[in-house]
Image (tube, helix red, strand yellow):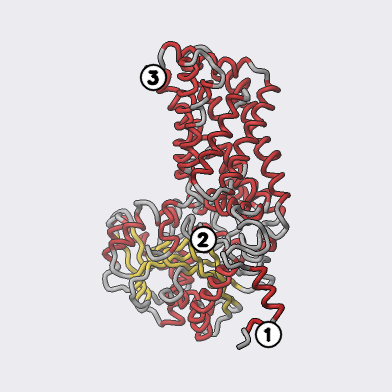
Amino acid sequence: MMDPDDSDPAGAVRDAIERSRSGAPAAGAVVRDRFSADEVFQRIIAAADEEVTSDKRELFFSGLAAGFAITITFLLYSSMTAATNDNPVLSALLYPLGFVYIIIGGYQLYTENTLPPVALTLERLASIPTLLRHWLIVLAGNFAGGAMGAAALTWGGVFSPKATQAAIDHAQHGVETSFGALFFKGAFAGLIVAGVVWVVYASRDTISRLVVVYIAFLAIPLGDLFHVVVSFTEMLYLVFAGNLALTLGLTQFVIPVLLGNTLGGIVLVTVVNYFQTTEHRLESARFEGSDRQLSLREWTLGSIAGRSYVSMIDTAAGAAPDDSSYRVLVPIGNPRTESVIVELACILASERAPATVHAVHIVQAPQASMSYDHDQHERIIADSDEQMKHVRETARSYDVPCETSTIVSHRSFEEVFDTAARDRANLVVMGWGADRPWGAARTERPLDELTSQLSSDVLVLKDRGNDASRVLLPTAGGPPSDLNAEVARALCSSADSDITLLHVVDGPDEREAGEAFLRNWAVDHDLADSSLVVDDSGDVEDAICRATVGHSLVLIGATEAGLLSRLVTDSLYFDVIDEVDCSVLLAERPGGRTVLERLLNRW
């Protein structure tokens, strides 16, 4: 019987090329056992993605651990110098140990960060201000850890007398080296460290990484080179010992080494390795590849000009919408369970025609879990689009135009506000709770910045499954209360809600003035038919909690301290959310801040 493959000679040839009986490729002598330059670059991009979106505290303490680990290098180098009578080779044998701990342990070392974050920045996936912020945090952590180590070595009685002298000699040698020599020696050390990072990401096993790290860092003392964190630790050791002034050590020793390390890592490795990869290197690192890059203005100015970072997947159009309609952004963590948020957004949009609802499904990718694979990206997008069908159907039932998109990112809370700014949203309507990706916003870096740079109105709903038939609106005036009044009017119009207005005064003597204020406020905001309640207890929190009895929804406006910060700190409104039984809608309107104040807050 004829083999089916015999009828297809071309297919047989292809099979012969693609495999052999042993399982190895027929074309080629060996199976490829290393990553290509593009694959290494993509692995570095993935690592940088996690690093630049990390929390400030996480970055700092990782840098602190790395800085303290450098103390081991300084300790062993000085001790071995004393034990081997200053033999240049034997004294350096244990020098790399601190770096081994750092790299194998995954701590943040400044000189390592001249490669991954720079690669991300070169691709215009992160802005220059983001890179500088990352460097500053890591370097501060490294220096703090090095300072702790230097203090322990100075006053902890760790060194023997001979080792103490060796440590002083090492530090003194650096101080006495000229600025130019320190710079160029630092540049070669930066080349070595950044090169180690590239090779580590190209390695497939821990043993290979260990060997590379050991040999590479052994070259620093043998080549009489300088590493900035080691140099800082040595310099502080001299300062603590009373042999050097701090300003002199920084300007004549640490700064030239820092500049050299930085330039060496960036120019001699990052740029060279960047340009040896192909122009298609980003296709699997970001959705739509280079089309998703930051603009030149965003790249140089960061969040002042718009975005400071490009998420892994973002299916929304890159340009801001051209239409002049009122735009309501609805961030969604789970499209199957957040119909209440969508309905609220549609109700508000229907009162502001022409209006458009933009529902964005934000998928938070856990650190180190996201595969940079184009096929996986497509599957995520298709699955998200299927889940968002229900959102689009809800919007159609309210006869409101609706757009949907998907964002996949290591971040969550910040993505909401980056999207709002890019989408030119007039209003953001979002849910709050542990089931949302942004429910863990306590740990996210941009929280303190976002609370003072809102570009749109914000409504945050803590839904407890109640209806909106009986609404309580506490007010003391101000832009957030104005926003809540708009919500109340929309609910009256669409859901025939009964509205109760609450105003709290400091005592019975102020009740009459409070009643007058509340009547006037109700008239000014087209809520004259509402029930009016004045509480003279002076305790806002207790008054709100008491008044919520019999109501299904309470609308609370932000004070000068801001809404979003109160969601993640122990404060009045956070307590109210926990203590009342009904749903809570919190509002913030970005009023009262000048353009200059917003720009300064973005830094």
Observer-nearest of 473 and 495: 495
Local SS, label 2: loop
In this figure, which residue is indicated by the disc labeled 3? 158
Q: In this rendering, is residue 277 above or below 26?
A: above
| x and y percentages locating residue 525 in the rendered image | 48, 70
Observer-nearest of 444 and 526: 444
In this figure, which residue is indicated by the disc labeled 1? 7
Separation of residues labelled 2 and 1 (CA atoms): 43 Å
| Earlier residue among tags 1 and 3 | 1
Query: In the image, which is nearer the foreground, mark 1 or mark 3?
Result: 1
| x and y percentages locating residue 71 in the rendered image | 46, 27
Separation of residues labelled 2 and 3 (CA atoms): 44 Å
Furthest residue in direction front, as rendered: 1
Observer-nearest of 574 and 71: 71
Res 551 quadrant in image: bottom left
| Earlier residue among tags 2 and 3 | 3
In this figure, which residue is indicated by the disc labeled 2? 370
Local SS, label 1: helix
Q: Is residue 443 visible?
A: yes
| x and y percentages locating residue 597 in the rendered image | 58, 48
Q: Residues within 10 Å of mark 1 (few under 14, many from 20)?
A: few
